[in-house]
Amino acid sequence: MPKQNPNVVILSTEEDVAESLALYVSQLSAKTIQEKGSFSVVLSGGTLIQTLRKLTLSPYKETVNWSKWLIFWVDERVVPLDNKDSNYLLAWNGFLSKVPIPKDRIFPINYTRSPQAVAKDYEARLRNLVERKVLPLSPTGFPKFDLMLLGVGPDGHVASLFPNRPQRYDLTDWVTYITDSPKLPPERITFTFPVINSSVNTAIVVTDKEEADAVAIALNPVKILPPLPCGEVKAESLTWFLDKDAASKLPINA
Ligand SMILES: O=C(O)[C@H](O)[C@@H](O)[C@H](O)[C@H](O)COP(=O)(O)O
């Protein structure tokens, strides 16, 4: 069951967050693979990929059991996989090409020009993985991933769920699409909140001053209405990793 209170880890610098994140992910990987034999990881785009860099270096490069990982995207821009805006390409260049995860365990979108078709296809592939028992289903009927790694935008968005767009209220689909994203490029697909909030572990990673207001609002026990999307994230275990810039508007630092 989702817990009410997140863990909040505040570190001095982005470098410290990168260290701490690598240790956290590697420990979760070892524990999860020991318990169930695989480790499903859901990536975002943005600065997160750069902050994951320490995982591609010693000792993690050698000690993590990469062959048991499965990789998915919480959101993706509807562009070809070799386009400079592709989250897959970002993750490939910054992370996936540097560690030995088998190619058939990495699940990028199948690109076509229709965002709706791309979302439908991605959801169908997730349903197939659930049918084949590669991914478990939560009691509420959504796929359950072992780890989601999320970034936050200055407007408080997570994945491609934005404050003033209806996708954040979708409680039915597993994967939906947006054609007018306020963050460019405009056409994207995204996991919905029921899928995001079915995760076993979620880390929200923020290492920028620009997001400090959104972080402070999301972590304030007094909620504004409607809440920012990043304040709506839940998981069995939810951890915010912040550097001092991202944490600068939290009351404790005021
Ligand atoms: O495709 C995307 O754009 C992302 O998945 C998006 O949700 C991102 O994680 C946040 O916008 C934070 O981005 P930054 O870390 O670059 O601020």
Image (cartoon, rainbow, N blue to C red):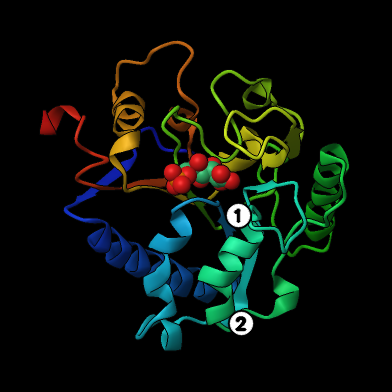
Residue appearing at x 48%, y 29% in the figure: 232
For disc 1, the neighbor class at 10 Å (few under 14, some 14 to 19, many from 20) is: many
Residue appearing at x 31%, y 48% in the figure: 207
Q: What is the quadrant of the C terminus in the image? A: top left
Residue appearing at x 64%, y 22% in the figure: 169
Q: Is residue 37 left or right of residue 3?
A: right
For the view shown, which residue lies furthest in the front direction? Answer: 84
Is ligand 1 less than 8 Å from the beta carbon at label 2? no
Is 117 rendered above or below residue 145? above
Q: Is residue 36 left or right of residue 253?
A: right
Marks 2 and 1, the one that precedes in the sequence: 2
The x, y position of residue 88, in whole percent, is 65, 61
Q: Is residue 244 left or right of residue 117?
A: left
Q: What's the mark number on residue 107?
A: none
Is 47 rendered above or below residue 82? above
Residue 48, quarter of picture: bottom left
Q: What's the mark number on residue 145?
A: 1
Tell me if residue 5 can be seen. Answer: no
Q: How many marks?
A: 2
The x, y position of residue 194, in whole percent, is 64, 35
Residue 24, quarter of picture: bottom left
Q: Amino acid at mark 2?
A: Ser
For disc 2, the neighbor class at 10 Å (few under 14, some 14 to 19, many from 20) is: some
Q: Amino acid at mark 1?
A: Phe
Check disc 2 and report the residue beneath it.
67
Residue closer to the observer: 17 or 45: 45
Disc 2 element: helix
Q: Is residue 146 left or right of residue 166?
A: left
